[in-house]
């Protein structure tokens, strides 16, 4: 068996309550992932960018904690190369904290076997916005100029000639615990290992619309709008697993992996017509909405600090200091339809979990979409 190194990258936490909440959720997710990795014979290293983090993460017993960043700002590519040089392993599994923890042992073992291959290559959970990846012949990455963040890793490796593939989209491969909304979705889904379940079940958080939204997803007479970085593949999967009709306003895909000077059209309309007009039209057209606010509210690609974004996700309007984000959050809170605000995972892995959760206690046979007709089966 070849040596496969495992790197879990955990970013520093912010100081606000909402940021610390997400940090604690990621820690719980890493505990479950570490346990599963050990079940398949892998022993991860926890990478941190500051000595204070290393001191703060002593709860991870028997896990190597490595401080890898000596200078600010943090650079993902240099960090990963430093780890590869230090370990000198044949293959590499990389996970951003908050990702991969829903994977079962069999899938983790598949990734391990991929990383052991003799041919260079990479398999990513999402080619367009990477959260975790398996890389064979990891030392070959030392000659590649890796990106500042992990999101464009797929683009970078493909441009460098590394054969890349992506995992089939599912809750397990696409869900990334990145915002408070993800924690709330995770709680209603009932998914996750012991550490995650213990954490989300004791959270003192409420969402004004999530229960109503789940009811709408299982109702044939309703119409839900998905807004933001929605993959067409994910949308197709969700369409076949909920009862309601769905519409999609898809913009901003790859916004963190590929920068663009072009401003998304819906973003332009929102800034021109105003927040009130946006919600008036949304309420007239749909019964509910799941909104990835990042591309919608970005100012020429720029986002406010995480504490503002996370407070918006939780509808903590008094803690949102950015004027546009506060106005938008207040309008969403007083909307006539249930609205879920979040980031990319809310319209990616989160949709898979919502499509599962909406059927709890309900008749699965009431889904909108019938089984495909099979003429050969009928003749037999």
Image (spheres, rainbow, N blue to C red):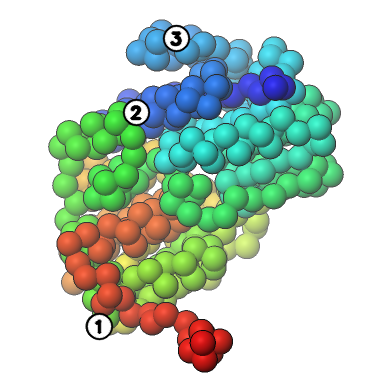
Tell me whether the residue at label 3 lies in contact with that at label 2, contact meaning CB atoms closer than 8 angstroms: no
Q: Name the residue under label 3.
A: 62
Say which element carries label 1: loop
Q: How far apart are marks 3 and 1 (CA)?
A: 53 Å
- At 57% across and 63% down in the image, what residue appears? 263
Say which element carries label 2: helix
Q: Is residue 294 visible?
A: no
Q: Quadrant of residue 78?
A: top right
Residue 32 image point, x, y percent = 39, 29
Residue 58 image point, x, y percent = 38, 10
Say which element carries label 3: loop
Up/down of 282 relative to 305, above or below: below
- At 43% across and 51% down in the image, what residue appears? 171
- At 48% across and 35% down in the image, what residue appears? 105
Q: Mark 1 points at which residue?
A: 221
Q: Name the residue under label 2.
A: 28
The single residue placed furthest to the front in the displayed view is 380
Q: Which of marks 1 and 2 is nearer the N terminus?
A: 2
| Quadrant of the snapshot with the N terminus | top right
Q: Earlier in the sequence, mark 3 or mark 1?
A: 3
Tell me whether the residue at label 1 lies in contact with that at label 2, contact meaning CB atoms closer than 8 angstroms: no
């Amino acid at each position: 068996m070849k040596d496969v190194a495992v790197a879990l990258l955990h970013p520093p936490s912010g100081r606000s309550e909402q940021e610390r909440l997400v940090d604690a959720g990621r820690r719980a997710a890493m505990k479950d992932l570490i346990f599963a990795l050990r079940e398949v014979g892998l022993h991860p290293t926890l990478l941190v960018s500051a000595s204070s983090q290393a001191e703060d993460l002593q709860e991870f017993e028997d896990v190597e904690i490595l401080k890898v960043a000596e200078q600010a700002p943090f650079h993902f590519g240099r960090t990963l190369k430093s780890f590869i040089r230090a370990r000198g392993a044949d293959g590499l599994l990389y996970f951003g904290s908050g990702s991969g923890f829903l994977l079962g042992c069999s899938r983790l073992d598949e990734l391990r076997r991929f990383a052991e291959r003799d041919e260079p290559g990479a398999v990513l959970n999402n080619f367009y916005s990477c959260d975790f990846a398996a890389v064979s012949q990891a030392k070959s990455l030392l000659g590649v100029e890796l990106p500042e963040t992990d999101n464009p890793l797929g683009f970078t490796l493909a441009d460098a000639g590394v054969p890349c593939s992506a995992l089939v989209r599912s809750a397990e491969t696409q869900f990334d615990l990145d915002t408070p909304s993800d924690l709330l979705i995770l709680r209603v889904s009932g998914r996750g290992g012991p550490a995650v379940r213990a954490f989300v079940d004791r959270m003192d958080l409420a969402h004004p619309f999530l229960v109503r939204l789940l009811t709408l997803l299982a109702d044939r007479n309703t119409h839900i709008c998905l807004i933001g970085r929605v993959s067409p593949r994910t949308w197709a999967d969700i369409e076949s697993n909920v009862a309601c009709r769905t519409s999609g306003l898809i913009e901003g895909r790859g916004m963190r992996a590929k920068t663009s000077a072009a401003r998304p059209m819906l973003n332009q309309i929102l800034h021109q017509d105003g927040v009130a007009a946006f919600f008036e039209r949304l309420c007239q057209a749909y019964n509910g909405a799941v909104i990835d606010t990042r591309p919608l509210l970005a100012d020429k690609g720029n986002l406010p600090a995480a504490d503002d974004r996370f407070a918006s996700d939780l509808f903590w309007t008094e803690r949102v200091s950015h004027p546009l984000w506060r106005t938008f959050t207040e309008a969403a809170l007083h909307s006539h339809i249930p609205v879920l605000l979040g980031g990319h995972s809310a319209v990616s892995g989160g949709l898979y979990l919502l499509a599962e959760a909406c059927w709890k206690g309900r008749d699965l046979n009431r889904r909108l979409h019938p089984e495909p007709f099979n003429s050969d089966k009928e003749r037999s």
